């Protein structure tokens, strides 16, 4: 390798490993996960309601750029903004009535696997504690 | 025909490369990983596939879990010089080590041991040297018919044709590509 390419490669190594670490951090950081969960729900229902970012921004009286940041999980949510989005999309984003002591030992999640010609279904048991629930298919 | 200037950029030593378009600061690989962790992009895919919200939520969590497996795996392969075990020929039942061979990175989740729906596409420059050209979330068994996945494969093929015709010189990292990638 030439000196120039060696230098680029050396810089790339640390940049690349840093990049991978940043990605891992983003998907394991509890705060970011929570923000992304909300962002994902908003994005999903915005599209299901046939709205664009611009239209949603208009409905909740904010700039489209703010909606873009919200959808990417890059912005902290104000309670008032969440409330307006909740109303605009007819979804629940603020769970103030959840009983903290409710039994969430295990959730049964129905998951569809998309294949070319057929749809198979499997049921995955996801534990919220340290129990070893089986992964079962049907 | 549309002309793109692409830069092939080393992203890890002299084993792993990707490329960027025109003045883009990021390579297609960096963009791909960011896309797979972007709640906006994932909600767009889920809604377009008519998933229920429960299905969409599982879909996203599965993708995030697999991105985590992928980042760990790539780090491991890079530090152990084992990229050639991660990338296999794109076309099944073909011999390895063909020049500029179309390859795919396919892996199992280190949590569930199930094959991930994430695919990385790359061209093999030599035994342990690859240029990542793109990737996809493979939701159907066949790539044909899935527009985005097909586009990613077409891009890999376009770059392969270009390199076969023009040669590949790692010291000349800027190319003018006369095709729609």
Image (tube, rainbow, N blue to C red):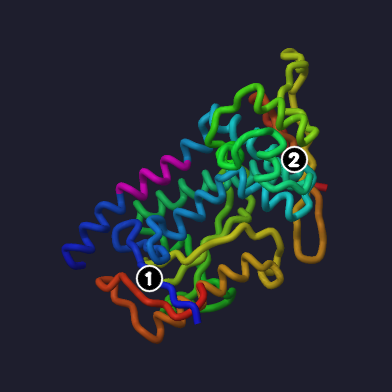
Q: Residue at the location (71% across, 32% down)?
A: A85
Please tell me whether residue A131 belongs to the stretch shown in magenta. no
Helix, strand or loop at label 1? It is loop
Q: Which residue is mark 1?
A: B127
Q: Is residue B76 above or below residue B133?
A: above
Which stretch appears magenta? A14-23
Depth order, front residue of A120/A67? A67
Q: Residue at the location (59% across, 36% down)?
A: A70
Depth order, front residue of A61/B97? A61
Q: Residues within 10 Å of mark 2 (few under 14, many from 20)?
A: some
Q: Position of residue B132 (x, y in %)?
A: 44, 64
Helix, strand or loop at label 2? It is strand
Q: Residue at the location (30% across, 52% down)?
A: A13
Q: Residues within 10 Å of mark 1 (few under 14, many from 20)?
A: some
Q: Are marks 1 and 2 on the same chain?
A: no
Q: Residue at the location (71% across, 28% down)?
A: A84
> Between marks 1 and 2, how big is the CA–CA gap?
39 Å
Q: Residue furthest bottom?
A: B165
Q: Position of residue A25 (x, y in %)?
A: 46, 36
Q: Quick check: B142 left or right of A2?
A: right
Q: Chain of mark 1?
A: B
Q: Which residue is mark 2?
A: A124
Q: Which mark is residue A126?
A: none
């Amino acid at each position: 390798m030439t000196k120039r390419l060696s230098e680029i490669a050396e810089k790339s190594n640390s940049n690349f490993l840093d990049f991978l670490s940043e990605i891992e951090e983003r998907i394991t950081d509890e705060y970011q996960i929570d923000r992304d969960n909300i962002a994902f729900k908003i994005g999903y229902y915005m599209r299901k309601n046939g709205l664009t970012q611009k239209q949603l921004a208009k409905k909740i009286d904010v700039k489209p750029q703010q909606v873009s940041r919200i959808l990417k999980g890059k912005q902290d949510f104000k309670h008032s903004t969440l409330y307006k989005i909740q109303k605009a999309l007819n979804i629940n984003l603020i769970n103030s009535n959840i009983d903290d002591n409710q039994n969430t030992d295990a959730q049964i999640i129905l998951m569809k696997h998309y294949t070319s010609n057929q749809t198979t279904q499997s049921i995955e048991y996801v534990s919220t504690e340290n129990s070893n629930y089986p992964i079962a298919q049907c | 025909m549309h002309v793109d200037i692409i830069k092939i950029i080393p992203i890890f030593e002299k084993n792993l490369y990707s490329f960027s378009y025109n003045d883009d600061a990021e390579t297609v690989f960096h963009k791909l990983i960011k896309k797979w962790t972007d709640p906006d992009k994932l909600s767009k895919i889920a809604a377009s596939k008519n998933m229920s919200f429960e299905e969409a939520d599982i879909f996203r969590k599965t993708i995030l879990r697999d991105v985590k497996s992928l980042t760990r795996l790539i780090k491991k392969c890079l530090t152990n010089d084992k990229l050639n075990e991660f990338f296999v020929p794109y076309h099944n039942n073909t011999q390895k080590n063909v020049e500029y061979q179309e390859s795919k990175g396919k892996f199992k989740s280190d949590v569930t041991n199930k094959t991930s729906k994430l695919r990385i596409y790359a061209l093999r420059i030599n035994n342990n040297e690859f240029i990542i050209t793109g990737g996809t979330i493979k939701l159907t068994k066949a790539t044909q018919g899935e527009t985005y996945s097909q586009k990613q494969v077409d891009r890999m093929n376009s770059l392969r044709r270009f390199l076969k015709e023009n040669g590949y010189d790692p010291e000349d990292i800027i190319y003018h590509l006369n095709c729609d990638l």
